[in-house]
């Protein structure tokens, strides 16, 4: 899982900046964006460190070597970091959501492994990845990564006194819904079936609901009220739609910029009634210049 400030800058540079900065505040804008980028980069680094500790290459090596490799071979998605940010926005501590954020990444990595199996009938426009293992090994390993993520969540209840079992159960339900037949599986299936049509639906099912799940899980663990959880779920959905359109199935689609702008407005609207010192930070994943005053 690639991390670091340079990667985050590359990611956020794709986001549309429609606000015009006034010359008088341009210097402040640069400082604010650096703060935003540092915030997300530190979250990414913490998640990576947690996963490396959770999935070392250990006996049985035939299981943990491919699992370790495929966990970090998948490209970074902002859904796990959004889980942490949502938890902190609700007043929680980073450690409370670390297992959930790591589980969200494992779900993403498992489905990425399945989607990119080295078999002949896969679409030729899929990104190339380096395969170290046979297709059967990668398929079985991806299957094993999903329950391993849920195991991380279950074990987290024993590692911290501030974890509420009911909240962990809620998070497990959120993640199992995401990975079920009406979640990401539906998105991958429809992408193959639709052959380029109804891009928004595919983005919603793949990146949209992945980010919605991450944000909702973080809000739950951070102690958010039901209405706050739902607002952050919707915020995550729109964030994922933006990511999917920019970097995935919709990146070459006509009218993409207008769609992205629409989802950006909808995303920020979900944050209007929320309060907290980190509103500017969590909103910067959509609009990096919002901390400018």
Image (cartoon, helix red, strand yellow):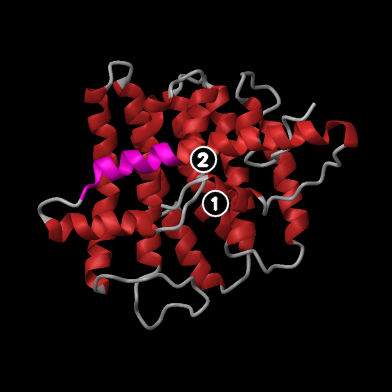
Q: Is 279 part of what is drawn in magenta?
A: no
Dot label at residue 112: none
Residue 265 location, quadrant: top right
Residue 222 lies left or right of residue 280; in this view the side is left
Is disc 1 placed on a helix, strand or loop? helix
Is disc 2 placed on a helix, strand or loop? helix
Residue 239 location, quadrant: top right
Residue highlighted by disc 2: 41
Magenta residues, dominant SS class: helix
Which residue lies at the image location 28% right of the left edge and 70% below the top edge?
A: 132
Q: Residue furthest left?
A: 59
**Neighbourhood count class around disc 1 (C-alpha, 10 Å): few under 14, some 14–19, many 20 upward:** some
| Magenta highlight range | 45-56
Question: What x and y, as percent, mark residue 22?
Answer: 89, 36
Q: Which of the pair 176/98 is nearer the observer?
A: 98
Contact between labelled residues 2 and 1, with CB atoms less than 8 Å apart: yes
Assign the C terminus to one quadrant of the image: top right
Q: Is residue 97 above or below residue 178?
A: above
Q: Is 55 part of what is drawn in magenta?
A: yes
Residue highlighted by disc 1: 7
Question: What x and y, as percent, mark residue 2?
Answer: 45, 52
Residue 104 lies left or right of residue 32; in this view the side is left
Is residue 143 visible in the rendered structure shown here? no
């Amino acid at each position: 899982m690639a991390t670091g400030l340079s990667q985050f800058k590359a990611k956020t540079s794709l986001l549309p900046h429609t606000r015009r900065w006034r010359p008088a505040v341009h210097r402040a804008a640069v400082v604010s964006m650096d703060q935003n980028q540092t915030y997300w980069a530190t979250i990414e680094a913490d998640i990576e460190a947690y996963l490396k500790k959770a999935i070392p290459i250990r006996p049985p090596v035939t299981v943990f070597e491919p699992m370790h490799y495929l966990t970090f071979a998948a490209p970074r998605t902002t859904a796990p970091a959004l889980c942490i940010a949502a938890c902190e926005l609700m007043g929680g501590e980073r450690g409370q959501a670390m297992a959930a954020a790591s589980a969200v990444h494992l779900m993403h990595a498992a489905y990425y492994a399945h989607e990119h199996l080295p078999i002949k009938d896969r679409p030729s426009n899929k990104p190339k990845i380096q395969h170290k293992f046979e297709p059967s090994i990668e398929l079985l390993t991806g299957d094993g990564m999903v329950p391993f993520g849920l195991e991380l969540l279950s074990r987290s209840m024993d590692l911290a006194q501030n974890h509420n079992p009911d909240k962990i159960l809620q998070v497990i339900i959120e993640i199992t819904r995401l990975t079920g037949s009406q979640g990401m599986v539906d998105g991958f299936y429809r992408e193959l079936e639709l052959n380029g049509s109804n891009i928004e639906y595919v983005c919603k099912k793949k990146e949209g609901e992945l980010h919605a799940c991450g944000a909702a899980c973080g809000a739950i663990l951070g102690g958010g009220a039901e209405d706050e959880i739902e607002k952050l779920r919707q915020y995550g959905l729109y964030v994922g739609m933006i990511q999917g359109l920019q970097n995935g199935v919709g990146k070459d689609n006509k009218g993409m910029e207008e769609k992205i702008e629409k989802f950006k407005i909808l995303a920020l609207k979900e944050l209007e009634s929320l309060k907290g010192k980190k509103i500017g930070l969590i909103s910067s994943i959509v609009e990096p210049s919002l901390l400018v005053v």
